[in-house]
């Protein structure tokens, strides 16, 4: 296939991914609406009964704070889920995997069409982050039952891809000279994977604040907090590596490791915000609403760093290619 045909195929894959994510969202929403209600107090009681343990970091886990490796559980309240709701959730999971495959196909064919790593502008970057976020959700689902997040992750991915197509779309082509480096495969790839995990944590955090007390169709707060914390624990080292790799790339491209460029500053601010969240969880024993608010402040910094800086602030990293 020619480069033009591969680029067109990539665009079709993006459209297919959006449609599949939307239909999967509907299926997950049906399962959530007609499935098992969850008692927030009951789920919290499950965490409170866990013994004090020593985690991998060597810090003791307090009673009432879910251990990092504790299973994600549903606290049933009332009758169990209907058979139709379970089938809808299962079908939605299959559609989510198909959407994931289409999203991957869009990235692969885009890269082949331009003969480079396919994240040289905002369009490609956002498409890749949506893929990473869905990957984080599906990978978590392989080990723990987190289908209760499916509808919200799918709508986030669909809206992200829609934003990429409508606002950030850039025709396939070469990148600016500063991005024509093997460092893009190291620095940007780490940032994309970390951003996908942090997006999953952000979705869980928003739901935590929206969920009321008592019985609800929304996930229990203990489950949401546990998912968010796990995702951040995995993402933080990757974001740290991305910041360090970016400094090394800057030295190679511009002859300095740090120059107070807006992108560099906000990447560091984001790192500090997530470090503050992890520090508060590990040392001060913060959990619940306070920890979630800190996490969402950090997520806001991440979003501004990934999108706002590229669009609204001029700098050496202004590669958005948005008119």
Image: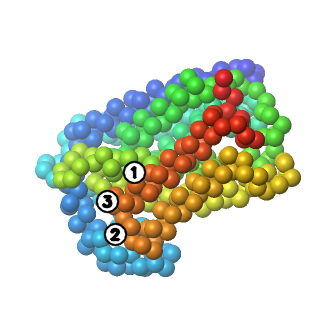
Q: Residues within 10 Å of mark 2 (few under 14, many from 20)?
A: many
**Considering the image in quadrants, where does the C terminus appear?**
top right
Give the residue at mark 2: 65
Query: How far is disc 1 from disc 2 in space, using C-alphas?
Result: 16 Å
- Label located before the other in sequence (3 or 2): 2
Identify the image quadrant of residue 221.
Answer: bottom left
Confirm whether residue 170 shows in the render: yes
Q: Residue at x 33, y 51 (%)?
A: 208
Q: Is 56 located above or below residue 149 in the figure?
A: below
The quarter of the picture where residue 123 lies is top right
Q: How many marks?
A: 3
Q: Is residue 215 left or right of residue 117?
A: left
Residue at image location 63% in from the left, 25% down from the top: 169
Residue pictured at 49% horizontal, 68% vertical = 279
What's the mark number on residue 252? Answer: none
Residue 213, horizontal then vertical, whole percent: 21, 53
- For the residues labelled 3 and 2, the Cα–Cα distance comes to 9 Å
Position in image of residue 50 (x %, y %): 30, 73
**Which residue does the numbered mark 1 point to in the structure image?**
205
Question: Under tag 3, what secondary structure?
Answer: helix
- Labelled pair 3, 2 in contact (Cβ < 8 Å): no
Front of the two marks 1 and 3: 1
Q: Residues within 10 Å of mark 3 (few under 14, many from 20)?
A: many
Residue carrying label 3? 222
Give the vertical position of 226 relative to 136 (above or below): below
Counting residues from the start of the chain, the first of labels 1 and 3 encountered is: 1
Question: In the structure shown, which secondary structural element does the residue marked by tag 1 occupy?
Answer: helix
As measured in the structure, the alpha-carbon distance from the residue carrying label 1 to the one carrying label 3 is: 11 Å
Q: Secondary structure at mark 2?
A: loop
Q: Residue at x 45, y 55 (%)?
A: 295
Residue 105: x %, y % from top left: 60, 33
Residue 253 location (% of width, % of height): 84, 48
């Amino acid at each position: 296939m020619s480069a033009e045909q591969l680029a067109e195929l990539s665009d079709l894959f993006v459209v297919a991914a959006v449609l599949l994510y939307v239909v999967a969202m509907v299926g997950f929403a049906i399962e959530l609406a007609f499935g098992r209600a969850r008692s927030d107090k009951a789920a919290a009681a499950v965490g409170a009964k866990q013994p004090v343990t020593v985690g991998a970091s060597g810090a003791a886990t307090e009673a009432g704070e879910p251990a990092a490796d504790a299973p994600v559980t549903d606290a049933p309240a009332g009758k169990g889920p209907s058979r139709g709701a379970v089938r809808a959730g299962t079908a939605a999971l299959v559609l989510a995997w198909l959407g994931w495959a289409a999203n991957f196909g869009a990235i692969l064919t885009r890269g082949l069409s331009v003969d480079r790593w396919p994240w040289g502008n905002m369009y490609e970057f956002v498409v890749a982050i949506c893929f990473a976020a869905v990957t984080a959700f599906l990978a978590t689902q392989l080990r723990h039952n987190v289908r209760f997040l499916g509808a919200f992750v799918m709508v986030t991915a669909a809206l992200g891809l829609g934003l990429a197509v409508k606002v950030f779309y850039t025709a396939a082509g070469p990148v600016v000279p500063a991005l024509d480096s093997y460092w893009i495969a190291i620095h940007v790839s780490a940032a994309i994977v970390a951003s996908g995990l942090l997006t999953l944590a952000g979705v869980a955090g928003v739901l935590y604040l929206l969920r009321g007390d008592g019985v609800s169709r929304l996930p229990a707060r203990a489950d949401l907090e546990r998912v968010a914390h796990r995702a951040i624990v995995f993402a933080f080292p990757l974001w740290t590596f991305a910041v360090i790799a970016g400094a090394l790339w800057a030295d190679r491209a511009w002859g300095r490791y740090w120059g107070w460029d807006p992108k560099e500053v906000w990447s560091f601010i984001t790192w500090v915000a997530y470090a503050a969240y992890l520090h508060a969880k590990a040392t001060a024993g913060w959990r619940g609403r306070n920890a979630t608010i800190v996490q969402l402040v950090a997520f806001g910094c991440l979003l501004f760093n990934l999108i706002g800086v590229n669009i609204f602030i001029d700098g050496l990293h202004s590669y958005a290619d948005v008119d």
